[in-house]
């Protein structure tokens, strides 16, 4: 089964120049912990509750004046829609993340997949589908991490 078969296609996003206060309200209203940051359909970062709580306080930013681009996570972890869901599970496990942006092969954001999307499938198909690993195997690093 491929990631496109399980991912959520309707993903709310923000731009890098969105105010942090607006992004936080959007997260609250949508009851989500992450919002992809996009320039059009191009994923440029991700803003998380952790970014808002820790980076804002630790770096002394003013929530009323700070834009998402100033505190967003720029080291992106993602998968492609045509990859197996096992790949997404391994990446999420290796990097200890619960949600993974999904890109098409043109690197445009097309969805998001979460552990909760994958886990019900893994229970139906056996535990081998979501392996327990400590280090990401080399075959899973192709186009998975983008350092910007």
Image: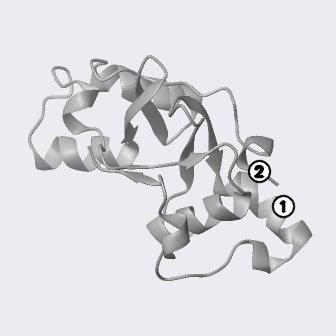
Between circles 1 and 2, the one closer to the viewer is 2
Q: Which mark is residue 2?
A: 2
16 with respect to 11 (left or right): left
Q: Depth check: 44 or 35 in front?
A: 44
Q: Residue at x 57, y 28 (%)?
A: 30
Spatial CA distance of label 1 from label 2 is 12 Å
N-term-proximal mark, 1 vs 2: 2
Q: Quadrant of the N terminus?
A: bottom right
81 with respect to 146 (left or right): right
Above or below residue 5? Residue 28 is above
117 with respect to 65 (left or right): right
Q: Position of residue 86 (x, y in %)?
A: 70, 64
Q: Are marks 1 and 2 in contact (CB under 8 Å)?
A: no
Q: Residue at x 47, y 54 (%)?
A: 144
46 with respect to 131 (left or right): left
Residue annotated with mark 1 = 121
Please tell me how crowded label 2 is: few (under 14), some (14-19), or many (20+) other residues with Cα within 10 Å.
some
Q: Position of residue 47 (x, y in %)?
A: 37, 38
Please tell me how crowded label 1 is: few (under 14), some (14-19), or many (20+) other residues with Cα within 10 Å.
some
Count of marks overlaid on the render: 2
Q: Residue at x 67, y 78 (%)?
A: 131
Q: Quadrant of the C terminus?
A: top left
Q: Position of residue 82 (x, y in %)?
A: 70, 46
Q: Position of residue 122 (x, y in %)?
A: 81, 67
Q: Quadrant of residue 72?
A: top left
Q: Quadrant of residue 45?
A: top left
Q: Which mark is residue 81?
A: none
Q: Secondary structure at mark 2?
A: loop
Kindly give the residue lying farthest to the right in the view shown: 124
Above or below residue 143? Residue 126 is below
Q: Secondary structure at mark 1?
A: helix
Q: Residue at x 77, y 50 (%)?
A: 2
């Amino acid at each position: 089964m491929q990631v496109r078969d399980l991912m959520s296609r309707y993903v709310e996003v923000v731009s890098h120049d969105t105010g942090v206060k607006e992004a936080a309200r959007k997260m609250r209203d949508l009851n989500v912990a992450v919002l992809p940051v996009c320039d059009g359909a191009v994923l440029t970062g991700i803003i998380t509750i952790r970014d808002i709580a820790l980076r804002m306080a630790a770096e002394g930013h003013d929530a009323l004046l700070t834009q998402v681009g100033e505190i967003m996570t720029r080291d992106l972890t993602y998968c492609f829609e045509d990859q197996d869901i096992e790949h997404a599970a391994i990446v999420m496990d290796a990097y200890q993340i619960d949600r993974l942006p999904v890109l098409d092969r043109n690197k445009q954001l097309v969805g998001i997949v979460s552990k909760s999307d994958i886990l019900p499938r893994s229970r139906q198909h056996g535990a081998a589908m979501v392996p327990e690993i400590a280090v990401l195997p080399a075959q899973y690093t192709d186009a998975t991490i983008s350092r910007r």
